[in-house]
Image (spheres, grey):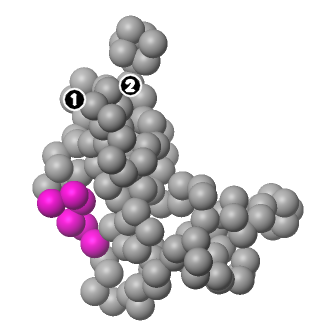
Amino acid sequence: MLRAAGKPYVVENVEGSGAVLKPHIRLRGVDVGLPHDRPRYFHIRAWPGANLRKFHVANLKMSTGANLKIESIHDGNHKTKRELIRLFGLEDVNPRSLARMSTRSITQGIPPAMTKAIAESVIPSKLYVK
């Protein structure tokens, strides 16, 4: 249905997914300036004129991790909610919204920095409103 609509889309996916929605890119927090290594996988159909090349060059080697203390985030690696808010770059989220989030929902979510990096690449700059 997504292809038939002819519109751009981004679908988060899982490692090793099937041929139909095979992930195009893999992003880790460190790839977008966050201090964690947890990967997320995305299948993308972009607007014509979109700049996806930066994602295909060694899977977004814009890593700013050289100056970051990288922390591993896995289901068995328990962090406090405050630590997860920092690791996922959620400091600017409304405190009332953060209060309603569980630590599990934070770790399962897509960090805003990843969403922004994908949006800036998928949507040509003339259409992107900052």
Residue type at tag 1: Gly
- Quick check: 119 above or below 45? below
Which residue is painted at 31% across and 77% down in the image? 64
Q: Is residue 33 visible?
A: no
Quadrant hosting residue 108: bottom right
From the top left corner, tell me how far across and down residue 75 is, in percent: 58, 71
Q: Is residue 75 left or right of residue 31?
A: right
Which residue is painted at 22% across and 41% down in the image? 51
- Quick check: 47 above or below 119? above
Q: Is residue 129 left or right of residue 108?
A: left
Task: From the viewer's side, name the closer residue of 55 and 75.
Answer: 75
Which residue is painted at 73% across and 77% down in the image? 81
Disc number at residue 8? 2
Please tell me which of labels 1 and 2 falls first in the chain: 2
Disc number at residue 90? none
Magenta: main secondary structure equals loop
From the top left corner, tell me how far across and down residue 77 is, in percent: 58, 81
Q: Residues within 10 Å of mark 2 (few under 14, many from 20)?
A: some
- Determine if the magenta segment contains residue 128: no
Label 1, label 2: how many angstroms apart (C-alpha)? 11 Å
Nearer to us: label 1 or label 2: 2
Range shown magenta: 58-63
Disc number at residue 49? 1
Task: From the viewer's side, name the closer residue of 27 and 74.
Answer: 74
- Quick check: 112 above or below 82? above
Quadrant hosting residue 45: top left
* Quadrant (top left/top right/bottom left/bottom right) for the N terminus: top left
Q: Provide the secondary structure element on which disc 1 rests.
A: loop
Q: Provide the secondary structure element on which disc 2 rests.
A: loop
